[in-house]
Amino acid sequence: MKKLLSLSIITLIIIAAASCGGSSDSEKTTEATTESTASTDSDDGNPSYDPHRGEGKFTSVDISPTLDAAKAELGNQVSQVKCSSCHKLTDEKLVGPGWAGVTTRRKPEWIMNFITNTDVMINKDPEVQAQLELCLVRMPNQNLSDEDARNLLEFMRQNDGVK
């Protein structure tokens, strides 16, 4: 019985680790190089950072007042594969924080930058760092495309009641 229990636990750990994704060493090197060359310095020599925009390529995201149901459904599919093991759609914390109200608390640019540039945001954004202190687990980089990130944003909007 103990062997069966141990084998089951080990299998669950392996499945959970595999589902979280990750980057290869070459991708990590590329990310580090991009991060060091992409930051601009402010007048005092410190890197500039806008906590309302996030750190990444999205400075503006075109959001319609009405929901794009097709994108929301695609975002739901991505969420089920990549996100739901750590995030609930309510405000309840699982591994990571719940998603309820996230689109009212954060700008679309910030959300998309966090989804697509997770590691840099965790390292630079004070609000993400504060959340990390509560959750105690770094969000892994899921290597999502810009299109997947936009679909997830639309799904989050749907979850927050946008019609």
Image (spheres, rainbow, N blue to C red):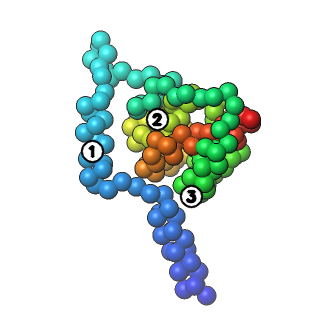
- The numbered dot on residue 30 is 1
Determine which of the numbered discs, if any, sits on residue 75 in the image.
none
Reply above or below: 146 against 42. Answer: below
| Contact check, label 3 and label 1, Cβ < 8 Å | no
**Pointer 2 local density, CA inside 10 Å: few below 14, some 14–19, many at least 20:** many
Give the amino acid type for the residue marked by disc 2 in the picture: Asn
- Label 2 sits on a secondary structure element that is helix
From this viewpoint, is residue 93 visible? no
- Residue 34 location in percent, x, y? 28, 37
Mark before the other along the chain sequence, 3 or 2: 3
Q: Are marks 3 and 2 in contact (CB under 8 Å)?
A: no
Q: Residue furthest top?
A: 43
- Quadrant the N terminus occupies: bottom right
Whole-number angstrom distance, CA of label 3 to CA of label 1: 26 Å
Instruction: Examine the rendered structure and indicate whether residue 11 appears above or below residue 58.
Output: below
- Distance Cα–Cα, label 3 vs label 2: 20 Å
Q: Residue at x 30, y 48 (%)?
A: 28
Q: Quadrant of residue 160?
A: top right
Question: At x 48% / y 69%, what residue is drawn?
Answer: 14
Q: Quadrant of the C terminus?
A: top right
- Residue 150 picture quarter: top right
Say which label, 2 or 1, has the lower sequence index: 1
Using the image, tell me which numbered label, if any, was put on residue 81. 3
Question: Where does residue 147 sit, x and y in percent of width and height?
Answer: 49, 43
Using residue 114 as the reference point, say whether residue 71 is left or right of it. right
Q: Is residue 94 above or below residue 133?
A: below
Identity of the amino acid at label 1?
Thr
The amino acid type of the residue labelled 3 equals Val
Q: Earlier in the sequence, mark 3 or mark 1?
A: 1
At 63% from the left and 28% from the top, the residue drawn is: 64
Horizontal and vertical percent position of residue 30: 27, 44
Q: Which residue is mark 2?
A: 113
